[in-house]
Amino acid sequence: MMHYSFEHTPNPKDIMQDSYRLLNDYGTLLIRIPVTGSYVWEKYGKEWVQLDAPRHLFIHSQKSMELLAEQTGFQIEKVIYESTDFQFWGSILYSNNIPLTATKLFSSDPMRDFRHLISKEEMKYFAEQSEKLNNENRGYQASFYLKKMIVYVR
């Protein structure tokens, strides 16, 4: 399992090849990452919170993950989009030159100090929109379940 670490690696193809070699024939590799092609990627562009440069070295799309899987012997079994309201409020903060460290990031109300920018009603709307975008495969982060393509030779 790679939970939001794959985007920080300098050689993703090498990581996939090593994972393939280490995984047993019926195992599954789970990679959870931010993805381009999402609604917020299009809306916020360079202020999209998940660009997170220079920490994120690669931001894949679903298509690039499909190509990488094919090149390394994997087949994508399923993709689940799992975005949250963070995609919106984080990007709004970045658009206003406010770092995430200025928030109460892990509290029940991370925007408490920024009500002048984002109301509680907007936060509720962002949560609803995130669920809708996930259902449309347009969220900002996804889980990729990859299986080894096993070829048996007779």
Image (cartoon, grey):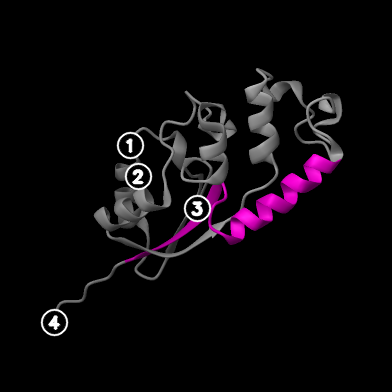
Mark 3 or 4, nearer chain start: 3
Q: Which residues are magenta?
A: 121-148
Q: Position of residue 120 (x, y in %)?
A: 85, 39
Task: Please tell me the numbered disc located at residue 11.
Answer: 1
**CB under 8 Å between callouts 4 and 2?**
no
Q: Position of residue 142 (x, y in %)?
A: 53, 52
Find disc 3 in the rendering and name its residue. 1
Find disc 4 in the rendering and name its residue. 154
**CB under 8 Å between callouts 4 and 1?**
no
Kind of residue at disc 1 = Asn
Nearer the viewer's eye, disc 4 or disc 1?
A: 1
Vertical comparison of 152 with 70: above or below: below
Neighbor class of circle 2 (other Cα within 10 Å; few <14, some 14-19, many 20+) is: some
State the CA–CA distance, disc 2 to disc 3. 12 Å
State the CA–CA distance, disc 3 to disc 1. 17 Å
Is disc 2 placed on a helix, strand or loop? helix
Q: Residue 94's image quarter? A: top right
Neighbor class of circle 3 (other Cα within 10 Å; few <14, some 14-19, many 20+) is: few
State the CA–CA distance, disc 3 to disc 4. 32 Å
**CB under 8 Å between callouts 2 and 3?**
no
Q: Is residue 70 magenta?
A: no
